[in-house]
Amino acid sequence: MRRREVLLDKKKVLRSVSLMSDRFSLDEFVDRMIILEKIERGLADIEAGRTFTLEEVKKRFDHILTKGTK
């Protein structure tokens, strides 16, 4: 499955950076941007209808959820 490109909004990036301490590592910055990208990707999925109901998730993962109960 090919990943869909998600573009970040500059205002959201700047807001996210403004909430960080005055000094931060590159790793902290990259981690913050990855989280922001994942949130944006999730919101895009919701908007496009790429979601599952709770029942659909339970059905898909039933074998995992019941593995320890047998």
Image (cartoon, helix red, strand yellow):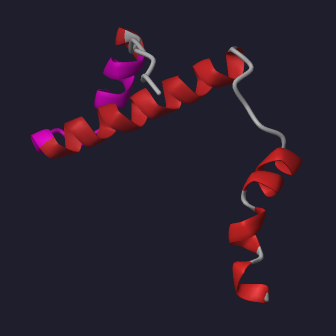
Q: In the shown orientation, is residue 40 left or right of residue 61?
A: left
Q: Position of residue 64 (x, y in %)?
A: 68, 69
Q: Position of residue 8 (x, y in %)?
A: 39, 15
- Could you tell me how many numbered marks the image carries? 0
Question: What residue appears at the point 43 percent right and 22 percent down from the top-left corner?
Answer: 2
Magenta span has 1?
Answer: no
Whether 15 is drawn above or below 57: the answer is: above
Q: For residue 36, which quarter of the picture?
A: top left
Q: Position of residue 26 (x, y in %)?
A: 11, 39
Whether 67 is drawn above or below 43: the answer is: below
Q: In the shown orientation, is residue 66 left or right of residue 34?
A: right
Q: Quadrant of the C terminus?
A: bottom right
Along the line of sight, the residue nearer the viewer: 28 or 49: 49
Q: Which residues are magenta?
A: 12-26
Question: What residue appears at the point 28 percent right and 39 percent down from the top-left corner?
Answer: 20
Residue 52 visible in image = yes
Q: Position of residue 57 (x, y in %)?
A: 77, 50
